Amino acid sequence: MKKLVLLLFIASFSVVSSQNQKLTSLKIDSIRFDGDAFLGYDSFGFYYSIKNNVFSKINTRDTLEYKNISLGKITKVDLQNPLKIVLFYENFNTVIILDNQLNETQKINFSESIIPIVAIGIASQNQLWIYNSMNQQLGLYDYLNKEYKTISVPFTESIKNYSSDFNVFHWVDNKNNWYVCDIFGKIISKGIIPDFDSIAIINESQFIYSKDSVLILQDLEKGKKTEIEISEKTFKKFYYKDQILSIFTSAGITNYKITIP
């Protein structure tokens, strides 16, 4: 009987411990920030922002800007390749590609090819991920040869949130189902994720999300949730890349080093 009580105590202690588990973060620095949206950093020490619909690239010495008033609001920015930055203007169904000096190298008006798009990202081999809202299918657009091909079956629900890299396209639908599609059109369901205010997909099993200014790291493969400790009690958005967590508040940007197991 004593052994049974001891085992139950240990089991209950383990459950409580796992529920209270937190991931510590190390504050690196803070910067003053005057903008409407913080978009992240590149490997060359620049950070990117939007203010009054002007896209900016900034470091300690230089500020570069790009604006295109005629296309309306910037809907999405893809910074994966700092030599080929992709800006999406959804209201005008147009994509702008910029070089590292923010010079416009390409302008693609998808209305000319009758492809209404609501999601976009840079893919491998001079291609763009395209979600065609007309047929509700994911495709790839070769922006050098101006060729488009559909690669997926129609989506059953609308897209709530999405991100991509060169090889895969992630999306969360309006029922919080998470899916991944590769460049060959193979779709994998990753499961249902919690409700969120903001989310960053790390890989095909891990993601960070915020809800009511609480940051959670979730690992679906391990079935584990971990709260990330930060100093800020409230924040507007967060950004994560390569073990650096950036917190965007009205006061500025605070950068933390975190180690994700």
Image (tube, rainbow, N blue to C red):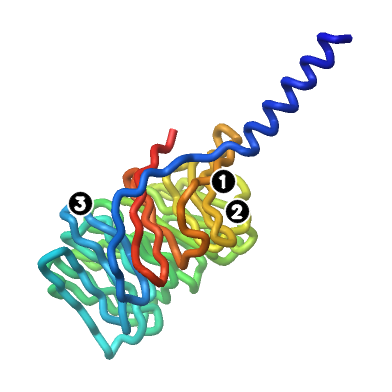
* Mark 1 or 2, nearer chain start: 2
What quarter of the picture does the C terminus occupy? top left
Q: Position of residue 122 (x, y in %)?
A: 30, 59
In percent of the image, x 10 and y 66: which residue is there? Answer: 61
Q: Is residue 14 visible?
A: yes
Mark 2 residue type: Asn
Is disc 3 placed on a helix, strand or loop? loop
Quarter of the N terminus within the rendering: top right
Q: Nearer the viewer, mark 3 or mark 2?
A: 3
Q: Residue furthest right?
A: 1
Query: Which quarter of the figure has residue 46?
Result: bottom left
State which tag comes first along the sequence, 1 or 3: 3
Q: Are marks 1 and 2 in contact (CB under 8 Å)?
A: yes
Query: Residue 15 is drawn in which quadrant?
Result: top right
Image spot of residue 247 (x, y percent): 40, 59
Q: Is residue 170 left or right of residue 96?
A: right
3D distance between C-alphas at marks 3 and 2: 32 Å
Task: Report how far apart the C-alphas of labels 1 and 3 lie in the structure.
Answer: 32 Å
Query: Which disc is residue 177 wearing?
Result: 2
Q: Nearer the viewer, mark 1 or mark 2?
A: 2
Q: Amino acid at mark 1?
A: Ser
Report the disc number at residue 105: none
Q: Which residue is mark 1?
A: 189
